[in-house]
Amino acid sequence: MPATPLPSQSPLWAPPTDFPVVSTPYVPGIRVTKVIGLTYGLIVRSRGLGRNIVAGFRSLGGGEITEYTQLLEQSRHEALARLKDHARKLGANAVLSVGFDTSEMSETMTEIMAYGTAVVIEPDPVMSQPVSLR
């Protein structure tokens, strides 16, 4: 299954609710029935000569370099889409404790990895009790 492309019409991207991908180790109202294990999505992107030239000129004036910001946003989205695809192939229906790792390769390429724990979840019929400090 191919990764979902970044919507070009919207500056904000929200993950679909049919397959939760969250940075927390739990989701309220949801019970983990099976922990499958580590899942990840990886992408290596080159900044490209054109972007480097434009960004070089922009850096002379200071401020945000939007070409790099957009590239990183697209790359993180792709890494998350690949993470989700990998988790589905493992039999998961959610990913918990998601994080990112980024590194530079040979001064022109950036590696971005999204990682987390692939799990099977279901709604929890038991209402959680409020926490009291008394």
Image (cartoon, rainbow, N blue to C red):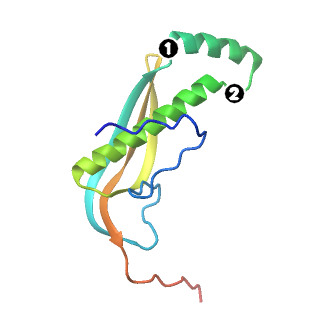
> Residue 7, image x and y in percent?
51, 38
Look at label 1 and name its amino acid.
Gly
Q: Which quadrant of the figure contains the C terminus?
A: bottom right
- Disc 1 crowd rating (10 Å Cα; few below 14, some 14-19, many 20+) is few
Rendered residue at 54%/82% (across/down): 131
Rendered residue at 45%/42% (across/down): 100
Viewed as shown, does residue 66 lie left or right of 97?
A: right
Look at label 2 and name its amino acid.
Glu
> Residue 96, image x and y in percent?
39, 57
- Furthest residue in direction bottom, as rendered: 134
> Residue 115, image x and y in percent?
38, 45
Along the line of sight, the residue nearer the viewer: 34 or 102? 34
Q: Is residue 117 above or below residue 67?
A: below
Residue indicated by mark 1: 48
Rendered residue at 42%/42% (across/down): 80
State the mark number for residue 61. Answer: none
Residue indicated by mark 2: 64
Q: Is residue 100 above or below residue 28?
A: above
Q: Is residue 59 above or below residue 71?
A: above
Question: Which badge, 2 or 1, is on the more N-terminal residue?
Answer: 1
Q: Secondary structure at mark 2?
A: loop
> Residue 60, image x and y in percent?
73, 14
Quarter of the rendering containing residue 81: top left
Rendered residue at 45%/47% (across/down): 99
Along the line of sight, the residue nearer the viewer: 77 or 109? 77
Distance in Å between CA atoms under marks 2 and 1: 18 Å
Viewed as shown, does residue 12 lie left or right of 27?
A: right
